[in-house]
Image (cartoon, rainbow, N blue to C red):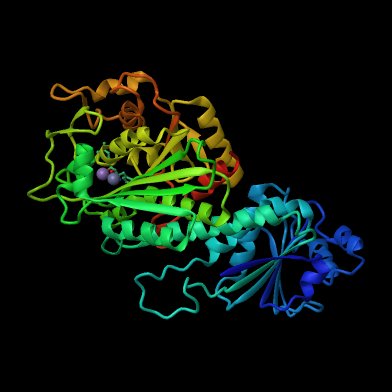
């Protein structure tokens, strides 16, 4: 799917040759009249829209649409006029989503989208994301033929705005966002036998091959042992698939600029290990690498946009399997910084791979570290699928991440990190246990991670500003619409670009 930006008045957009036209009305001016006075042309749909409104058939509320077929003066067969409601980012997203829903099931290869007023172009990333989300098709393991490589029927989207020069940056952001989200979805949706740690490593390598701005290094079991990542290695022990530690760098900024490190949980399948999960919906544990996928997607987006930033993605990738080699409940393992961990539950494996990545991050002297993980079912219970859990030892970092999420409509909510939550992690046989007694499970998991963000063992100063995003509730949808959401690529990209 290709996006193209053009300077078009609503009247000119009607003359564009395409299969369908989407028109987003200016807020509070559902008649489009003002706009067309400015362009000195009559908007062919003005009368129809006014009549529909007068009849109460087309309310000026976001999500309300008017579908027209073969309208006079419109080159496209289909036209959908969309109310922008009060004109907020969310209104615009809901409007475009409703417009795309109105076109669902129709064969549309070429689409023209017309933004009714210039101020709406700040929402281009949101508009383009809504179009991409509505047309995304998973293909990797489907035999059926599709129209283009990405599986989408929609091949060409022309976006018209009255001043395209002013919309350029937002358009580029949108293009990169869509590319990054598509990539994240592609890998997150793949079944575990098509997304092993080895394949994930190769995906990162081929990303780096395709984009000169990226460099990639992939470590295997021997190198990981040498680094002393005994915690990470203990999770991989039960699997026949060798682990991978992926280091993907985007160094677009000055050499002296400290990098931002993104760590993505890459459990390509989580059976729970010896603490085996129940069978129902266990297939969804192929999504336990959504954090990793979001890191790959974000770096892919950066590679397209080329901002002056340094960002390093770290992905510990492994399966969590039961076997004769697997780690057993009660086993004690040693992390890269020497902390010993009593593994009371082998299903609390995400924290056992992220901790070693956090320790590794220290050597990169980062300006900030954000880890992204489908870490706890408890976070999904606490926040549902609306907001990700945001944990941070740094107020400024937490505030900037949350604000980026609001702007990108990729929401997060700050959760507490009181030391009392760490009480339950005490162990009689190691420095720390990997689980605490029931209650506040998302927080106790974050407290476990926090121990590995300090300069010296668990007690020192903060080695870097750190935040943790628990995306267990938001990374994928279950049920009939089962599939990855690509969250929080939108939040991360917005946050990084605001730097
Ligand atoms: N990957 C899971 C978390 C998860 C579960 C995400 C369900 C989304 C949906 C994680 O590895 C896990 O199993 N966590 C345990 C922790 C528990 C053993 C303390 C959980 O949440 O049950
Ligand atoms: Mn688990
Ligand atoms: Zn897991």
Q: Is residue 432 above or below residue 158?
A: above
Q: Is residue 488 visible?
A: no
Location of residue 469 by image quarter: top left
In what quadrant of the picture does the C terminus appear? top right
Instruction: Please state the total of marks drawn on the protein image.
Output: 0
Q: Is residue 166 above or below residue 421?
A: below
Q: Is residue 330 left or right of residue 286?
A: left
Residue beneath the point at 67% across and 74% down: 20
Location of residue 68 by image quarter: bottom right
Residue beneath the point at 43% across and 48% down: 249
Q: Which residue in the rendered view is the most extreme toward the left?
A: 324
Q: Is residue 27 left or right of residue 297?
A: right
Residue 139 point in image, percent of width and height: 41, 71
Q: Is residue 287 visible?
A: yes
Q: Which residue in the rendered view is the most extreme toward the front?
A: 255
Residue beneath the point at 34% across and 41% down: 375
Q: Is residue 260 above or below residue 196?
A: above
Residue 256 point in image, percent of width and height: 51, 36
Residue beneath the point at 90% across and 60% down: 38
Q: Is residue 294 above or below residue 350?
A: below
Q: Is residue 128 left or right of residue 199?
A: right
Residue 393 point in image, percent of width and height: 44, 25
Which of the pair 397/312 is nearer the observer?
Answer: 312
- Of the four image quadrants, the one with ligand 3 is top left
Location of residue 399 by image quarter: top right
Residue 379 point in image, percent of width and height: 38, 38
In what quadrant of the picture does the N terminus appear? bottom right
């Amino acid at each position: 799917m290709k996006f193209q930006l053009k300077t078009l008045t609503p009247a000119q957009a009607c003359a564009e040759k395409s299969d369908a036209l989407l028109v987003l009305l200016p807020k509070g001016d559902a008649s489009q009249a003002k706009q067309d006075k400015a362009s000195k042309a009559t908007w062919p749909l003005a009368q129809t829209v006014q009549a529909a409104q007068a009849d109460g058939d087309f309310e000026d509320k976001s999500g309300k649409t008017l579908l027209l077929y073969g309208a006079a003066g419109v080159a496209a067969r289909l036209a959908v006029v969309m109310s922008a409601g009060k004109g907020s980012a969310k209104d615009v997203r809901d409007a475009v989503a409703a417009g795309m829903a109105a076109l669902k099931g129709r064969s549309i290869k070429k689409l023209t989208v017309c933004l009714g007023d210039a101020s709406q172009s700040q929402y281009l990333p949101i508009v383009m994301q809504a179009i991409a989300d509505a047309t995304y098709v998973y293909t990797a393991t489907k035999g059926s033929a599709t129209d283009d490589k990405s599986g989408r029927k929609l091949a060409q989207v022309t976006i018209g705005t009255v001043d395209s020069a002013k919309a350029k940056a937002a358009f580029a952001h949108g293009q990169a966002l869509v590319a990054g989200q598509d990539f994240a979805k592609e890998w997150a949706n793949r079944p575990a036998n098509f997304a092993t740690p080895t394949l994930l490593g190769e995906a990162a390598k081929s990303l780096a091959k395709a984009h000169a701005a990226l460099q990639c290094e992939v470590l295997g079991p021997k190198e990981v042992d040498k680094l002393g990542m005994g915690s990470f290695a203990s999770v991989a022990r039960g699997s026949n698939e060798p682990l991978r530690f992926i280091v993907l760098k985007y160094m677009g900024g000055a050499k002296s600029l400290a990098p931002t490190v993104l760590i993505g949980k890459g459990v390509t399948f989580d059976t729970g290990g010896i603490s085996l999960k129940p069978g129902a919906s266990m297939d969804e544990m192929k999504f336990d690498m959504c954090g990793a996928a979001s890191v790959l997607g974000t770096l892919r987006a950066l590679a397209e946009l080329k901002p002056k930033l340094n960002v390093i993605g770290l992905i510990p990738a492994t399966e969590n399997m039961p076997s004769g080699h697997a780690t057993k409940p009660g086993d004690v393992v040693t992390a890269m910084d020497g902390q010993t961990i009593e593994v009371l539950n082998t299903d609390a494996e995400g924290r056992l791979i992220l901790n070693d990545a956090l320790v590794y991050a220290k050597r990169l002297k980062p300006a900030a570290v954000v880890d992204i993980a489908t870490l706890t079912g408890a976070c999904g219970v606490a926040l549902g699928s609306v907001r990700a859990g945001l944990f941070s030892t740094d107020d400024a970092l937490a505030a900037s991440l949350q604000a980026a999420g609001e702007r990108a409509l990729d929401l997060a909510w700050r959760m507490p990190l009181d030391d009392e939550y760490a009480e339950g992690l005490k162990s009689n046989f190691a420095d720390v246990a990997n689980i605490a007694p029931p209650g506040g499970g998302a927080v106790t998991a974050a407290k476990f991670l926090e121990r590995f963000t300090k300069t010296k063992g668990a007690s020192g100063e903060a080695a870097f500003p750190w935040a943790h995003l628990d995306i267990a509730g938001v990374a994928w949808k279950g049920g009939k619409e089962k599939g990855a959401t690509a969250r929080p690529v939108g939040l991360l990209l917005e946050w990084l670009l605001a730097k």
